[in-house]
Image (cartoon, grey):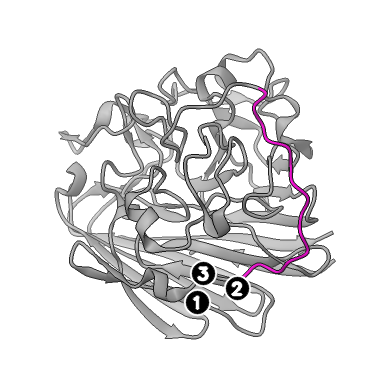
Amino acid sequence: MNKFFFAPLALAAGLTAGCGGNGDGAPAGADTTAAAVKAVPATLPNAAAFNSTVDGKPTALYVLKNSGKLQAAITNYGARVVSLLVPDKNGVLTDVALGYDSIGPYVNGPETYFGAIVGRYGTRIAKGKFKLNGKEYTLATNNGPNSLHGGKKGFGAVVWDGKQVNDSTVELTYLSKDGEEGYPGNLKVTVTYTLAGDALQIGYEASTDKATVANLTNHTYFNLNGQGSGTINNHVLQISASQYTPVDSTLIPTGKLDSVAGTPFDFRQPTAIGSRINQDNQQLKYGKGYDHNFVLDKSATAVTISGDQSGIVMKVITDQPGVQFYGGNFMTGANTLKGGKKDNYREAFCLETQHYPDSPNQPNFPSTELKPGQTWKSTTTYEFSDR
C-alpha cells in the first residue's frame, strides 16, 4: 500500500443550506449514478485565472509541489484549497477537492465555501448571540436564525496576505479586526500550508488582544473518486466516535452527547455513507442527511474513508475534539466546477475538524474562548493511500 499525506495546519436563507451549502436539498433518491473514473491525469488550474483584485487587495494562486506524489493549489482568497491531486490505485493523479477554475466564482458564485478556511467561528452559533465575561455579543445571522461560519463575510470571503516561502510552502495571514461580524478583539491568524515529502501540512495559529471565541476549520469538499465523478454515498466511512451532538430543527446542538449505538450515526465500523441515510430518523430529517458533529474518541485516527472507484483511502488525524461530517445534502448542481463539472446532489463530503457547534452557548462543551496572551494552535492531517 502506497501512502501520501495531507495535513491541514449551511442552512442558507431560511434553513435550506447545509454546513457549507447555499441551496435547497434534492429529494431523496436523487443521487446521480457514479461515473466511471477516467484514466486521464488531473492537472492544476491556470494560476493566471486567479490574478485579480478583491476589496482592493490582489488575489493569487500558489502551487505547491515537491518530490512527493501530491500536488496542491492554494489561493489567498479565503486561504482555500483549490485543488488537491492524489494518485489513485492505478497511479493516475485525481483531483479529490471540489473547486473552481478561476477566482470569479469563489467571489460571486452561489457556493463560496469550497476549500475555504472558515472563521472566526466555524459551524453555527444559535440566534447569532453569545455571552463572554458577562457581555452579550450579537453576530450576523446568515443561516436562518443562526450565525454560520463567521457570518455574512467570514474568513472564507476575505483576501489574506500570502507569502510563498519556497516551492513547497505558503504562509497566509489575516487580521480580523475588533467588531468584525460582531466578534470582539483583534484576532491575528496565520495558516501555513507545507508540502513535506508526501505530506501537505496546514498549521493554524491565532492570538487576540481581547477575550474572544475562535473555532477555525477547513471546508474542503472531497470526492475521493475525483471531483464530479458521481455520488459519494458508496464511499466507505469509519469515524472513531462513540457519541455525537444531536441537533434541533435549526441544526443547533441540544447540549446533549448521545450515543451513536443503534443509530445511523454509528460509523465505528466501516460503513457505506448511503447505507442508512434514508432511515426514519429525526436527526437525519433535520439535516436532510448527515450534517452533524461527532464527538471524537481518543484515537490515533479520527476518520478513515475510501473511494469505491479510485481506491484512494483518506485518514484524518486531528487534535480537535470533534468533526462535522456533512454529506452534500444541499448540493444542487448550481455551481460549475473545474473542467465544467457540476456540484450535484451528494457528490461531495466535508470533514470539518473542530470544537463543537454553539460551544459559546453550551457550558458543558469544550471551551472556545481565547484570551489575550494565549496562542491557539491546531493541526489536522489527511493521510492518503491507495488500496
Quadrant including the N terminus: bottom right
What secondary structure is found at the residue carrying circle 3? Answer: loop
The quadrant the C terminus occupies is bottom right
Q: Give the number of the mark in front: 2 or 3.
A: 3
**Residue 133, disc:** none
Q: Around disc 3, counting alpha carbons within 10 Å, would you say few (fewer than 14), some (14 to 19), or many (20 or more)?
A: many
Q: Is the Cβ of the residue at disc 2 closer than 8 Å to that at disc 3?
A: no
Badge nearest the viewer, 1 or 3: 3
Prevalent SS, magenta region: loop
Q: Mark 2: which amino acid?
A: Gln
- Asked if the magenta segment contains residue 38, the reply would be yes
Residue drawn at the location 33% of the way across and 28% of the way down: 13
In space, the residues marked 2 and 1 are separated at their CA atoms by: 8 Å
- Say which residue appears at 32% left-offset and 54% top-offset: 107
Q: Please say whether residue 8 is visible from this viewpoint.
A: no
Amino acid at dot 1: Val
Q: Position of residue 167 (x, y in %)?
A: 50, 85
Residue 340 lies, in percent from the top left, at 55, 54
Residue 91 lies left or right of residue 30; in this view the side is right
Q: Which residues are magenta?
A: 29-43
Q: Secondary structure at mark 2?
A: strand
The local secondary structure at tag 1 comes to strand
Q: Nearer the viewer, residue 299 or 67?
A: 67
**Which residue type does callout 3 highlight?**
Pro
Label pair 2/1, CB-CB below 8 angstroms: yes
With 213 as the anchor, is 200 left or right in this view? right
The residue singled out by tag 1 in the image is: 63
Residue 284: image quadrant is top right
Which residue is under mark 3? 45
Name which of mark 1 and mark 3 comes first in the sequence. Answer: 3
Q: Which mark is residue 71?
A: 2
